[in-house]
Amino acid sequence: MAVTTRIGYATGLDSYLYQKPQNPDSLCPLVQKLDPHEYIYGTDTIDTILHDKSFREKSKQKLLGAIRIPSESFDEMVDPGTTDSLDELYKLEPVWEQFEKLHQYLEKTFPLLHKHLKLEKVNKFGLVYTWQGSSDKKPILLTAHQDVVPVQEATVGDWKFPPYEGGEDGKFLYGRGVSDCKNLLTGLLETVELLLEEGKFVPERTIILGFGYDEESQGKGAGYISKHLEARYGPDSFLQIIDEGSSGYKEFEGLKFILPATAEKGALNAVIGLYTPGGHSSIPPEHTSIGILAQLINEIEAVQFESILTNANPVLNTLQCVAEHSKSVDKTLKKNILKAHFDQNANKKVIEYWTKNPGDKYLITTSQAVDIIQGGVKSNALPEYAEVLINSRIAVEESVDSTSSKLLDQVQKIAKKFDLGVVFEGQEVVKPTEKGHFDFTLPQTLEPAPITPINDELWSVFGGSLRYLYEELLLPNENSTFVLAPFLSTGNTDTKSYWDLTRSIYRYQPGLPTPNSNIHSVNERLNFDGHLGIVAFYYYYLQVVDKIEDSKFGH
């Protein structure tokens, strides 16, 4: 690998950044593949990461060590900031002690990183590592989360390997958190440790690693980290944030796609309670509060949200990429996709095609799931209160207001039928009657995320670097051209707390596909060769993005 001069770095990147698309009228221009060897110091480290058996085994043991610490996250946990003393906190909430053990493990496993980077613990357990750059270039933030979904005791015996011991069957690595997302956490730390060990990379651009502690539950840890970073650097102060999200690549219509999520659906928890008079069960009304609530649930489920596909949704751009680059797409469908952004009839046909699969449908449709229902305390006492929780994931064209308005209209319809009042978010909408009233609240709301810009220089450098990873490093013998396209996340990552830091948020993990990865379930597993791809990618990407002046990105 040739070592270039500083002038060579700039010249090479200038040449790369100003390459014009082969087809400027394309709805999905292919980003140019970026060979990192022109921009990084000359080593054979990438080959070692991907192919050296000793490196592979050490990397595997580092990940397994993190898995063996059950840093579980629950929906209801005492905030770490509640007490000044860790001992007192552990008495109130013993689960937090596992996070301290995880921190001790990371310090022991990655000693150079802990020696040379500044570590700040935000609200006791949020981890912020800063590798200070030598210039005033905007920093880059790489994130993951420390917590995992709890393992149900009744399912432990169903695991191929004990969930908090882990194991490998020759190809897949098993264990809770192995793919969500202690693989990303340890991969990022391992990359920085390796760069420090070689001692040749001195960053100009500050590199920050930020690890929240409750992404799987409340998500407050990332919120504290975001406030900490904004207070230090200011709003819109970061070049780029890369978090967990879609991973590896997807094969569709004969093509391989790299699909970083550039947007996320919003979220809404709606709690609809119903108060009615009590009494003895031997003299019931025609409908108890539970019976009325059942009719409301039926009304809500009978009316689904409309599917919408516009330019605001990255999924349309994904489909345009399929239509432009795949030779397997039906000709009529291809024409409809390429006209869907301006032709109403074509748009309708594409929606009909896309919504046949429920997994695809909810990429363009607001969902509604009746998840929790409770009410009544005694078999011979009429329930005086019952409630239902409905979780919605909000399409990018919708909002918290439009989603809650649909539910409120349906609550009012049932209230009118049974002569009941309606209170919404503490405000009286329909005066309560002697027969009772609905109490409709929104304890959790999140608007759809701002859309990350694409087809700009940062998108090109990120995507071009990923094309190199897959086409030249991970799958060099397949002779495939990988298509970079934006995508949508139906769930929410910790990036929901980072919107004010930058508009350039990518939710994506490099790697290889893991069939039946079983995230959040029994036998969670990972194609471990793909994990090495995380280390290899960030090893050179951090060096590439370090060389580029912010002005090239429009910053």
Image: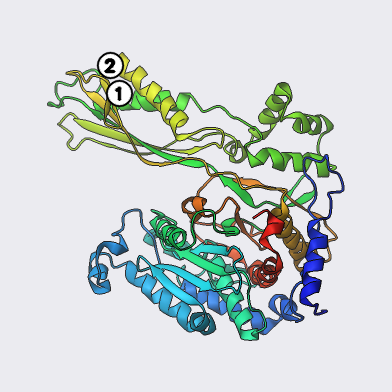
Q: Which of 522/96 is in front? A: 96
Rendering quarter of residue 476: bottom right
Residue 292 badge:
1
> Which of 510/12 is in front?
12
Direction from residue 123 to residue 257 in the image, left or right: right
Residue 174, image x and y in percent? 54, 67
Quadrant (top left/top right/bottom left/bottom right) for the N terminus: bottom right
The spot of residue 95 in percent (x, y) is: 33, 66
Label 2 – label 1 distance at C-alpha: 8 Å
In the foreground, 335 or 228? 228
Residue contact between numbered discs 2 and 1, judged by CB atoms under 8 Å: yes
Mark linked to residue 418: 2
Crowd around label 1: few <14 · some 14–19 · many ≥20 (10 Å): some
Judge depth for marks 2 and 1 and give the one in front. Answer: 2
The residue that appears at 55% across and 63% down in the rendered structure is 141
N-term mark: 2 or 1: 1
Q: Position of residue 392 (x, y in %)?
A: 46, 37
> Up-down: is 522 above or below 496?
below
| Residue 316 appears anywhere in the view | yes
Residue 69 visible in the current orientation = no
Residue type, mark 1 in image = Ile
Residue 366 x/y as whole percent: 52, 34
Q: Image point 72% across, 61% down: which residue?
A: 466
Q: Which of the 4 quarters of the picture holds residue 121?
A: bottom left
* Residue drawn where x is 42% and y is 26% of the image: 405
Say what secondary structure mark 2 lies in: loop
